[in-house]
Image: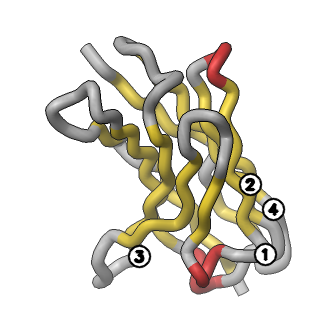
Amino acid sequence: QVQLVESGGGLVQAGGSLTLTCVASGSDFSRATMAWYRQAPGKERELVAFVRSGGRADYADSAKGRFTISRDDAENTVYLQINGLKPEDTAVYYCNADSWTWDKPFWGQGTQVTVSS
């Protein structure tokens, strides 16, 4: 059973930092592309960043400069560091894993990030 479990969200003041963690289990994730998405209230889920097998990362334009995604394949873990948090970063952040060896991508349950002004 593939499982993704996010943690690290919370209530933070604007300008603060958070590191979100996603721990994966139930499959070989070393070949998977791991991603973070977010969904703000009343908005559609959007891609924040993803990191390919091998470590190359890409970011949504809105995430460039303040967000850093990284992975530790030995620990089946992917991280999202967010600096300079803004109220508009308030959202539920979801971990996603996708691999050509699977028939579908997998999602975590999400972790809430709330940024107060």
Mark 4, Cα crowd under 10 Å, few <14 / some 14-19 / many 20+, is some
> Mark 2 and mark 3: span between their CA atoms?
18 Å
Mark 2, Cα crowd under 10 Å, few <14 / some 14-19 / many 20+, is some
Residue identifier under label 4: 17
For this view, does 25 lie left or right of residue 65?
A: left
Say what amino acid the circle numbered 2 marks.
Answer: Gln
Q: Between tags 2 and 1, which lies in front?
A: 1
Q: Earlier in the sequence, mark 2 or mark 4?
A: 4
Q: Identify the residue at horizontal 74%, vertical 57% (top origin).
A: 68
Whole-percent x, y for residue 46 in the image: 39, 71
Q: How many marks?
A: 4
Whole-percent x, y for residue 61 in the image: 60, 82
Say what amino acid the circle numbered 3 marks.
Answer: Ala
Q: Earlier in the sequence, mark 1 or mark 4?
A: 4
Q: Between tags 2 and 3, which lies in front?
A: 2
Mark 1, Cα crowd under 10 Å, few <14 / some 14-19 / many 20+, is few
Residue identifier under label 2: 81
